[in-house]
Image (cartoon, grey):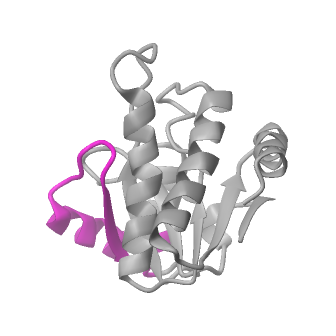
């Protein structure tokens, strides 16, 4: 099931929340900073052992002080106008997160909007990629999982609702 929700991702009771991280995986601003702060210093300590993450890839850690059991970190692309494979890299973020969720036999995962903050990815295009990528990989893997697109603003919520309605699973 795919759904959308206006909420603080750090408070969700799901198997895993997704962190829109930077390549170092050592915390930052936005959702990354909020997740690190809510999870506590143990998250940073575990992230140090991962030695970073390439754009489009994903790595998993424990959730520590979060309601979620796990945090799946993924690094979205910085928007440079769309000619540097940004769409492919963003789609890979969603695909690789779902693949890790399947590998760990998770039943629920919550995504923030990846790359649409300081990385500058156009929100409309990013929303379409998020929804289509998750749908496609779930069909490909034939796996049942509850996916929540956790939105930070009412505008984001409406955008995700529109795509979920236009393109039913």
Is residue 144 found left or right of 22 in the rendered image? right
Q: Is residue 103 above or below residue 134?
A: below
Task: Write the residue at 71% across / 71% down.
Answer: 1
Q: Could you say where residue 60 lies in the image, as x and y percent from the top left?
A: 33, 70
Which quadrant, please, contains the C terminus?
bottom right
Q: Could you say where residue 25 lies in the image, as x and y percent from the top left?
A: 29, 54
Q: Is residue 72 visible?
A: yes
Task: Write the residue at 55% across / 65% down.
Answer: 139
Q: Looking at the rendering, which quadrant does residue 124 occupy?
A: top right
The residue range painted magenta reads: 38-64
Q: Is-magenta flag for residue 162?
A: no
Q: Could you say where residue 99 lies in the image, as x and y percent from the top left?
A: 39, 68
Q: Is-magenta flag for residue 54?
A: yes
Task: Write the residue at 37% across / 59% down.
Answer: 96
Q: Total of numbered circles in the picture? A: 0
Q: Nearer the viewer, residue 24 or 156?
A: 156
Q: Nearer the viewer, residue 152 or 141?
A: 141
Q: Nearer the viewer, residue 141 or 115?
A: 141
Q: Is residue 146 above or below residue 107?
A: above
Task: Write the residue at 79% across / 39% down.
Answer: 159
Is residue 112 found left or right of 77 in the rendered image? right
Q: Could you say where residue 77 lies in the image, as x and y percent from the top left?
A: 39, 34
Q: Is residue 6 visible?
A: no
Is residue 11 found left or right of 31 in the rendered image? right
């Amino acid at each position: 099931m795919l759904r959308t929700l206006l909420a603080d991702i750090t408070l969700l009771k799901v198997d895993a929340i997704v962190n829109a991280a930077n390549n170092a995986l050592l915390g930052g601003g936005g959702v990354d900073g909020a997740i690190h702060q809510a999870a506590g210093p143990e998250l940073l300590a575990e992230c140090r052992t991962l030695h970073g993450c390439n754009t489009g890839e994903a790595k998993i850690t424990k959730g520590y002080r979060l309601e979620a059991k796990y945090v799946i970190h993924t690094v979205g692309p910085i928007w440079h106008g769309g000619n540097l494979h940004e769409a492919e890299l963003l789609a890979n973020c969603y695909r690789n997160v779902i693949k890790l969720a399947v590998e760990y036999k998770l039943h629920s995962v919550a995504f923030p909007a990846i790359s649409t903050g300081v990385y500058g990815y156009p929100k409309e295009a990013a929303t379409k990629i998020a929804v289509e990528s998750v749908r496609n990989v779930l069909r490909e893997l034939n796996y049942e999982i509850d996916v929540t697109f956790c939105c930070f603003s009412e505008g984001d919520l409406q955008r995700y609702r529109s795509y979920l309605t236009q393109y039913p699973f």
